[in-house]
Amino acid sequence: MRKFMLLRLVVILVLAAASLQAQVTYDRILAGVDKEPHNWLSYSGTPKNQRFSPLTQITTANVKNLQQAWIWQARSLEKFQATPIVVDGVMYTVEAPNNVVALDAATGRPFWQFNYTPAPEARACCGRVNRGVAILGNTLYLGTLDAHLIALDAKTGQQIWKSQVAVAKAGYSITHNPTVVKDKVIVGTGGGDGPIRGYIAAFDAKTGAEVWRFYTIPGPGEPGNDTWAGDSWKVGGVGVWNAGAYDPETNLVFFGTGNPAPDWDGSTRRGDNLYSDSVVALDADTGKLKWHYQFTPHDELDYDSTQVPVLADIQWQGKPRKVMLWANRNGVMYVLDRTTGEFLKGKPYVKTNWLDGFDAKGRPNRVKFPSKEGTAIYPHVHGGTNWAPPAFSPRTGLFYVATWENSGTFAVEGQFPRAIPGPNTRQTTMGATNLVPFYNDPDTGEAYGVVRAYDPQTLDQKWEFKLGDITWGGTLVTAGDVVFSGGRDGYFLALDARTGALLWKANVGGQINHAAMSYAVNGKQYIAINAGSSLFTYALP
Amino acid sequence: MRHFLTGFALASALLAPCVASSAWAQHETAQDLLDGERAYRDRGCANCHGPNGDLIPGINFSAGQFRRPMTDAELSRIIRQGIPNIPMPATNVTEAQAGQIVAYLRSLAAGKAAVAITGDAARGKLVYDSKGNCASCHSVGGIGGRRGPDLSNVGQARRAPDLERALLDPKADVQPNHRYYRVVLQDGTTVTGWLLGHDTFNVRLIDGKEQLRSFAKSDLKSHGFVDTPMPSYKNTLTPQEIADIVSYLSSLRTAPAPTGGRGGQAK
């Protein structure tokens, strides 16, 4: 084992030297951490979005010795949600809302910063945040809050081009990292809680010209338009605000889509409201829809399906199968065939009561509806999980999700969902959760955050680690069999990927609002995590 | 008691436009208020501020509490243009709709504040200090106990009906950050106090002797929430005394904090 680790270290060092400051070709992005474990070339390490680092320097045995390496403090007080990318010793991240910074990944000292002030009409519903940049060649790509795509020189931070993706004044925004596929940069439009018609668009990486556009709401004459009553399709929302995935074998790019609008009043938009709360599989060259699966038809509870799609090759009923794993905001975990979109399995992974099963094609049988008197519906409007990325380890075969448990909503027709009436439950309503102390305890039946591992073959829970507060943090898993996660109470945690045992913790003093990532410079493995307004890195002494 | 409150509510509602010095509130119709309420709900305001406008600390529309005193025009502008660098977004509501929302917000505060004038504040202070023994746990202006919430600004933070309920049935609706907690140490020692913080690994509270205490959960035999020690005054104070004390509490409002120099620049 020790020999294997040493060999791995040598490989890392050789790779680091060979690729020093080299262009980030598309082939490099596609292989990602699988071939260059010291780099982190896209949002989740590879376009499969497993957020698995093959680095092995940090293990279950030595993680207890982790020490802080450096801190970079953002000046912005917005939530720090960006996952950095690391290219040959240089880290690129985004200070909210849209300032890009290039840091020495070994010291945290800046090379350059690109400052961008979104136009005043930019009005993202839920925070002026950004989740990171993409890279291709020597160019970085940034989606902006005012719905533009900007190309930057990765060496200098100079702007190369800027393209309008959508009209900010009409309610559109971009908060997520672009997805690079071949020579295209693909982004979706946020703003779907308001009266927009969302879309995903691909842009020429060199020129910024739009190449194709896929509307998340079908227009007249297109299949699915009849799932919207009247003209509701024109303003039905369905934003796209989280990372896409890409499967080179089928040339399909996958995105989760947001809720239909208006969020809690479905009376004006009778029907299933396709392709809201769905995963859409698009031909990466043309943007044509190949398949879709709708997780929550006719949503009235804001169950965005904008989670990060995770692609994995697993054994399914005794045979290898290419699947997509999805822990949805609606409280249900899914396994889909990512080539065909076939529904393979769905199972609640937190307290969930809005459905009692599925038909043969995977359509949920909904049994709880908002009512005049109010209906207790689980999970809460924030969901079983939200947008923070989960992780999958090909070593353990487990799927790691940071979730909210035991959190419900009181849904009244056409009204904003509220906490279940009763003592001490109001803090679970939206808004308050972000701003006031949140006390919970299993004894009181209140909501709590928890990191869990699931077996994708059965969707059975394998272990859990309970948090004392809710969590907006995601998970990272490494080949050292360590899961890194955290929550709003400001602890960064290392858990045993096989048992969930707590191996190490650091008090980072601020909310963790994103998942960690890992990289190496000069043979040293680092773990990076955002907390509060700062980016922390940890390494062994 | 209820009809008593209602009488004052009506009287006070008539006075409300003067108190609020609100252009919209002076001219709005009932339909404007309904439209304002609908817009508040449907245009996303309630998403963050909550149905009663009280979900963001420091802001409580039901009590007329904003970050600072604001004119209708300022509120209308914020609704339409948002506030840069914080999550308050711009919206595409028209000026007229923004005015209706402002009118609705003003009506909320006017209507709720009205109920407060139910008794005599001076008499209420006497009850607070003597028969009620409130100062044994609560402080006003730095005078009093620290085992319960500071009440110096409670008239701004809480509505009169909520104050009344807190006196009559204190266990019914405890504020999330006002709850009591009990820890049991390995040797059986029990410590109960006002919970100040609670996370994955630690519990922090102020105990009955007003000592700040911190405990590692791993060192505890058990821990969990307990009922508030706040007694019910249902059988110990008369309805008039309750009304008086509510009136006194409603009068407790601290001046807004200074906002810095001209133009917000520190010099």
Image (cartoon, rainbow, N blue to C red):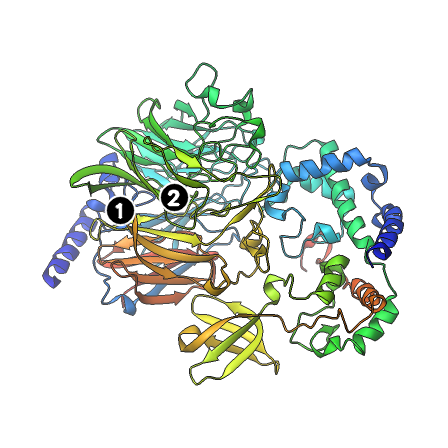
Chain of the residue where label 2 is placed in the rendered structure: A
Chain of the residue where label 1 is placed in the rendered structure: A
Screen quadrant of the C terminus of chain A: bottom left
In the image, residue A498 lies at what x, y percent? 24, 59
Nearer to the camera, A307 or A29: A307
User: Is A14 displayed left or right of A416 in the figure?
Assistant: left
Residue corresponding to mark 2:
A332
Residue flagged by tag 1: what amino acid is it?
Thr
CB-based contact (under 8 Å), mark 1 and mark 2: no
Q: In percent of the image, x 61 and y 83: which residue is there?
A: B209
Q: Secondary structure at mark 1?
A: loop
User: Is A277 displayed left or right of A268 in the figure?
Assistant: left
Quarter location, residue A507: bottom left
Q: In percent of the image, x 67 and y 59: which residue is there?
A: B266
In the image, residue A213 lies at what x, y percent? 41, 23
In the image, residue A504 lies at what x, y percent? 32, 67
Residue corresponding to mark 1:
A458
